[in-house]
Image: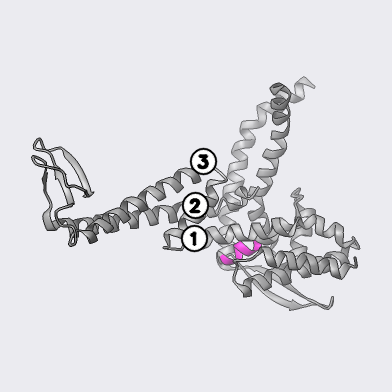
Amino acid sequence: MAKPRAQSTEGDSPDRWEAQLRKGALEMAALASLWQGRLYGLEIIRFLENHSSLALAEGTIYPILNRLKVEGLLTSEWVEAEAGHPRKYYSLTEAGRQRLRLMAEAWISFSRGLSRLLEPVLEKQETSQ
Amino acid sequence: MTAEIEIGNYLTSLRTHLGPIAVAEREEIVREIGAHIRDSAEQSGAGVPAILARLGSAEDLAAQYREGLLIRRASLSFSPLVLLRATLRLATKGVSGVIVFFWGLFGYAIGAGMVLTALMKPFLPANTGVWFSREGRMLDTGVMFPPPAPPAHEVLGWWYIPIMLILGSITLLVTTFAIQKFLGVSQRLVARLQS
């Protein structure tokens, strides 16, 4: 009886791992979305959907923005919109820009290293197909 | 149910579940989520139930805000209760939290014990102290009823008070800083822990 359960857990784990990976990258992605200028929450969500493969539960982004603001990496201001209600716009602070640069450098060197490591894995897959 | 009532119910539930967060911050969160729902409805034309489903339940959303805040505040706090509470929250998510929680509890118990027994020394001078055997092995420390009988002998006398006050205070401070450090590191992992 235990065997099918173990198999299904193994089957689920790549999805779970990918979800963890996306979540881990979300903080950096949220900061990156503001590099060009201020955006409000929904614009950040749309930006991430269009410019990355970070499909996310929409509720996830707001607590992250709140935390980044308290850490001093973002500032926010309420701006009256034509829609009839104000929107909360976020911008990077200087500390936020610096942190994002460091994160980007670390991410690029980390992913380059891992890509080299994974090259043989993908080559093998290609030849076996 | 009309869209406005659905939105109102969601925001009321969010406000309730945000509970311990300061009123001004709580209202700002509710206002922002309200703006998100209305903007989503206007821009995508999706129905309010679909938008609320994408946001997740008000309870889950509030929990994500609360968790980030609790751990962040605790990492700046000196209160053993706040620190242990935040550690206990992390203890439900991983083994490192469990270890730090019990180490914290142990550190506070030892530190508080040292300070308390130092304060009891003036009232129970014969029962409070550090006793060694004739061979130089430590037998007992603290407040003893009855005190160890000879040949065991007490070695600190009235020095017990300043020594235990200093050692106890250092233990309490080290425990506090160690938990703060752990929570500070964990802050960066909060997003991962929330899954």
Which element type, helix, strand or loop, lies under badge 3? helix
* Chain of the residue displaying label 2: B
- Look at 21% across and 48% down and name the residue there: B145
Nearer to me, A97 or A46: A46
- The quadrant the C terminus of chain A occupies is top right
Q: Which residue is mark 3?
A: B95
Tell me the magenta residue range: A64-70
Res. A38 in view: no
Which element type, helix, strand or loop, lies under badge 1? helix
Location of residue B84 with respect to A20 vertically, above or below: below
Q: Tags 3 and 2 in contact by the CB under 8 Å rule?
A: no
**A116 with respect to B150 (left or right):** right
Residue A96 lies within the magenta run: no
Location of residue B46 with respect to A84 vertically, above or below: above
Estimate the spatial distance between the alpha carbons at disc 2 and disc 1, rounded to whole Å: 9 Å
- Local packing at callout 1 (Cα closer than 10 Å; few below 14, some 14-19, many 20+) is many
Nearer to me, B161 or B172: B161
Q: Which residue is mark 2?
A: B87
**B1 with respect to B23 (left or right):** right
- Look at 83% across and 69% down and name the residue there: B38
Q: Give percent across and percent down for residue B78.
A: 41, 63
Location of residue B45 with respect to A82 vertically, above or below: above
Q: Give percent across and percent down for residue A85.
A: 80, 77
- Local packing at callout 3 (Cα closer than 10 Å; few below 14, some 14-19, many 20+) is few
* Chain of the residue displaying label 3: B
- Look at 81% across and 55% down and name the residue there: B53
Q: Tags 2 and 1 in contact by the CB under 8 Å rule?
A: yes
Nearer to me, B194 or A27: B194
Numbered tag placed on residue B62 in the rendering:
none
Q: Which residue is mark 1?
A: B74
Question: Quarter-wise, where is residue B118 in the image?
Answer: bottom left
- Residue flagged by tag 2: what amino acid is it? Thr
